[in-house]
Amino acid sequence: MTAPSTATATSLVAYEDAVRRYDPVLGIEVHVELGTLTKMFCAAEVEYGGEPNTQVTPVSLGLPGALPVVNGKAVEYAIRIGLALNCSIAESCRFARKNYFYPDVPKNFQTSQYDEPIAYDGWIDVELEDGAVFRVEIERAHMEEDAGKNTHVGGATGRIQGAEYSLVDYNRAGIPLVEIVTRPIEGVGDRAPEVARAYVQTLRDIFRSLGVSEARMERGNVRADVNLSLRPTPESPLGTRTETKNVNSFRSVERAVRYEVSRQAGVLDAGLPVIQETRHFHEEDGTTSSGRVKSDAEDYRYFPEPDLVPVAPSREWVEEIRATLPELPVARRRRLQGEWGYADAEMRDVVNAGAIDLIEATVAAGTSAAGARKWWMGELARRAKQDEVSLEELSVAPAQIAQLQQLVESGRINDKIARQVLDGVLAGEGDPEAVVAARGLEVVSDDGALLTAIDEALAAQPDIVEKVRGGNQGPVGAIIGAVMKATKGQADAKRVRELVLDRIAQ
């Protein structure tokens, strides 16, 4: 059922005005695909990008008589996530059937958890770019299976409306998911978009550090459903919420919150009720549009899954898992910042650029934290932006950057030459040492060769020589420039200056 839309009846309110007059309240549901080898309830392999409908079994296709078996690794991963989110782990929990019909759910129900999740009552602290910290309360983290994927062919939007026909790929049906559900996130005020973005980003970082998922949002490994409501004051009852579904980038999470705040404020200003509905986010313009009236829990007719016994992780097993948890991202960042000596602003820039792992690996390969940051946050960041890729996607390894910086520090190349060496590395010509050798880029350090170039430059510009001898050292830069040009930039400019002044003084 499609919800009636108020979009044509209301105008957007400027975000700043909306948050001045209304109090936004967030609720975020994050789904993470677990990185198991097989699906949640069968032995079908999990592999991204396979040919449609090749990674299926009778269980994931919902065929009659096919019985599910719980994936033990998925349960372990769910416990790891719950512990990392400071949750209590249930001594016994069970699966339920969530009944609804979609063509990408072949059984006509989703096997999920409802009133007995595996993890509950947790929290995480979320740090914003300026260092402010918000605590987000976690209501529960529960296990479930993913649905398949619909492809709507024809039409202008790629959605079912206006499509000529639809295709269904069941490869994703049955992939293990953990869904993390927050309690209402209150008190965020005008920082609601930032908090939403930082929360999802914090979860993504936790998933990666735990090793439970690749957590690649562009592949749909992590998806966020963003709930938002407005109320007149922080003391007022919660307003009617909307749920913007399947938002799959940090930027989109932020934009979806901003848009819904402005849209709902317009609805309320017009004296109309906000409709409890799901909404679609449109990446191209940052807007949302009505999906369907939002169902309440009772509409799904949950009942216990009769084909699965309860999951009862022993306390010993839970503690064994707890003992293997890695250092979590926030603690790791604080430790590394102390070790590297970065200022708060410098560390935030590194984190926001996604460079923390790259810098850590570069330091481990033998260079200084300052040297590693110089390259990853300077020249490499510029090139990544220019090519519209992430730092991780650049064709250069941390060990190569460490070697490049060592060549600079040893005096074998200078920073200008280093950028040429980097060109070669990015072009696939090998490590920096190999590029220097192949291109003949090592700094000219032989004083004899430098003096030859200096004498030629001095002979070509006698007027500058006279000015320098008269006490005006300003023009000496022209001589140095000529020598650098003659040596193709491969001379040490500081040493050239020393030799030029010495030669003129003779």
Image: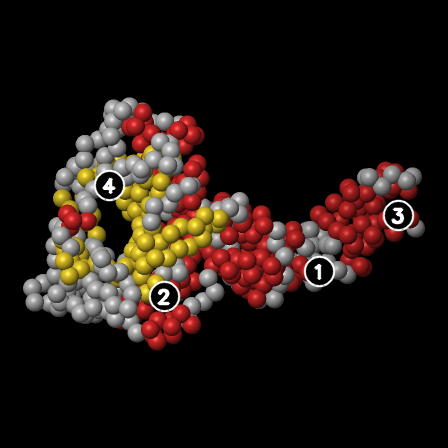
* Residue 207 in view: no
* Mark-to-mark CA distance, 1 and 3: 25 Å
Q: Position of residue 311 (x, y in %)?
A: 23, 69
Secondary-structure class at tag 4: strand
Q: Residues within 10 Å of mark 2 (few under 14, many from 20)?
A: many
Sequence-first disc among 3 and 4 = 4
Residue type indicated by callout 1? Gly
At x 33%, y 49%, the residue is 183
Q: Residue 278 got which mark?
A: 4
Q: Tell me the amino acid under the disc marked 4.
A: Thr
Q: Where residue 292 sits: x, y (%)?
A: 19, 39
Q: Earlier in the sequence, mark 2 or mark 4?
A: 2
Dot 2 corresponds to which residue? 80
CB atoms at circles 1 and 4 under 8 Å apart?
A: no
Amino acid type of the residue that numbered disc 3 sits on in the rendered structure: Ile
Please name the amino acid that badge 2 sits on: Arg
Identify the residue under disc 1: 411
| Residue position for label 3 | 504
* SS category of the residue bearing label 1: loop
Q: Position of residue 135 (x, y in %)?
A: 43, 50
